[in-house]
Amino acid sequence: MYTASAQQATDTRPNILYVFPDQMRNDACGFWREEGFREYRNAKGDPTITPNLNRFARESLVLISAQSNNPVSSPHRAMLMTGMYSAEVTGVPLNCNTDFPANSLNPDIETIGDVFSKAGYDCAYIGKYHLDAPTPNDPERPGHYVSEKYPVWDAYTPAERRHGFNYWYSYGTYDVFKAPHYWDNEGVKHEPYEYSPVYEAKKAIAYLKNRGNVRNPDKPFLMMVGMNPPHSPYNSLRDCMEEDYELYKDVPIDSLLFRPNITDRTLPKMKCAPYYFANVTGVDRAFGMILDALKELGLDKNTIVVFTSDHGELMCAHGEGSEAKNMPYAEAMNVPFLIRYPDKIEPRVDSLLLSSPDIMPTLIGLAGMKECIPATVQGTDYSDYMKKPISGKRPQSALYFKNAGGSFECLGDTLDFFPLARGLKTDRYTLAFFIDRERKLAKTYFYDDMKDPYQTENLSLEENKELVKKLCKELSYQLKKIDDPWFKEKVLKDLIGYRY
């Protein structure tokens, strides 16, 4: 067994453990129904059972308003890894699959793995990656994709594209939770018949215990664990653990999905709620396994632990039938963000508007390596604020993005992307503009999130001119800062103004 002193004999910098399930909305954390947390939110939390997260929340900084700026898997992961908003630079404006062969994480850009690896960290990635466009590079069948389905979503990531992660046990995207698969450092495929969050927790624990000498115990580590559930599918016991489903199967559907913004209760997806929440509980169990191992090994005191998600899930809110994410609604954008760093970060609930690109520089700053933050980073390092909330300027807004496929070649592959929507979330309001292919306004989403936390009343632009003008000024400022396509093309200039 390794103790903290044995594990870091020559380097006392903090370890970092980053756990992020896919498609878990903030309200799915059970602690939002508990005293000490529920009073911070206007919306009511989901009736989920998450004992490990509930305990962890009381030891952590818990953010009320962490935002997934482009609430879909690959774009969020690109922002997380690079600290950048610009899809033109990261190379990932859309979800990675073979329909968009140009959509893949830029191999030349410096990522969080590159930074920590160069700084002397041992770096591990376990689970879902979803940042490479699939190519015919199956290690077992050279010249073939890893899947026969088309479009191909899953992908193998070769060593030269792993961005500093020296321990690799991962896959692109594969939504079979009880029979997952992974490729290891050497490209050997593993196919365990075990619920993927629990299996990934076991692999994380094996890494922590250094079974098989998989890491250098004299170095601090960065370990990222990307769990797929509670992502779809969530239709049957094939998709979750039966013991978790048992906790929800007899709860009336109106108690599981009570939100007043569910306008169509005949949607077939309503029946998915018990399976979705069962996967939330399954993820909680797996996270608890890792936390227990950290404590057992004496690593918990010097490890920064983050629990978050890449985006949320609408689960029938706003009349949603097929699109579960990628919208400017709170259920999609607002994600859990809990961070524990004993004796360095005071446990508390905070309304900091954290954006996806802020995570990378903040973690680098918390590790005491501010000088290592790449010049390409567009996010903000909030490490000082997290340690002492009275210092530093708070963000005024978080941007919202939605992209779609752009032009097409003769075979149907997407060559570029179309910037479909832009908007922002402030401490009170959500405002987003959608355009058609002629760059004309197609739809607006405008909500007072304080008075209307479930976003049921789409406010009139005409009746709120001064407020809209103020919000558009902030939007134009933020779009200019990152040199967004909307700013460069002055999209909706008469409305947004682009005064900067």
Image (cartoon, grey):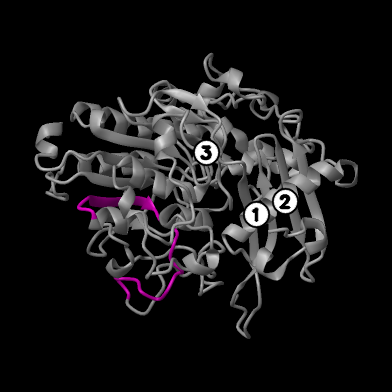
Amino acid on which the number 1 mark rests in the picture? Tyr
Q: Secondary structure at mark 3?
A: loop
| Amino acid tagged 3 | Lys
How far across and how far down the image is residue 259, in percent? Answer: 71, 29
Which image quarter: residue 433? Answer: bottom right
Q: Residue at x 54, y 13 (%)?
A: 35
Residue 425 in the figure: left or right of residue 374? right
Instruction: Choose top left, top right, bottom left or bottom right for residue 57.
Output: top left
Residue beneath label 2, please?
A: 473
Mark 2 and mark 1 in contact? Answer it, CB < 8 Å: yes
192 in relation to 439, above or below: above
Q: Is residue 412 above or below residue 178?
A: below
Taking depth in this image into account, of 479 and 114 the one nearest to the observer is 479
Task: Give left or right: position of 85 versus 479.
Answer: left
Magenta stretch bounds: 119-141
In the image, 80 versus 226, the foreground residue is 80
Q: Is residue 317 left or right of residue 278?
A: right
Q: CA distance from mark 3 to mark 2?
A: 19 Å
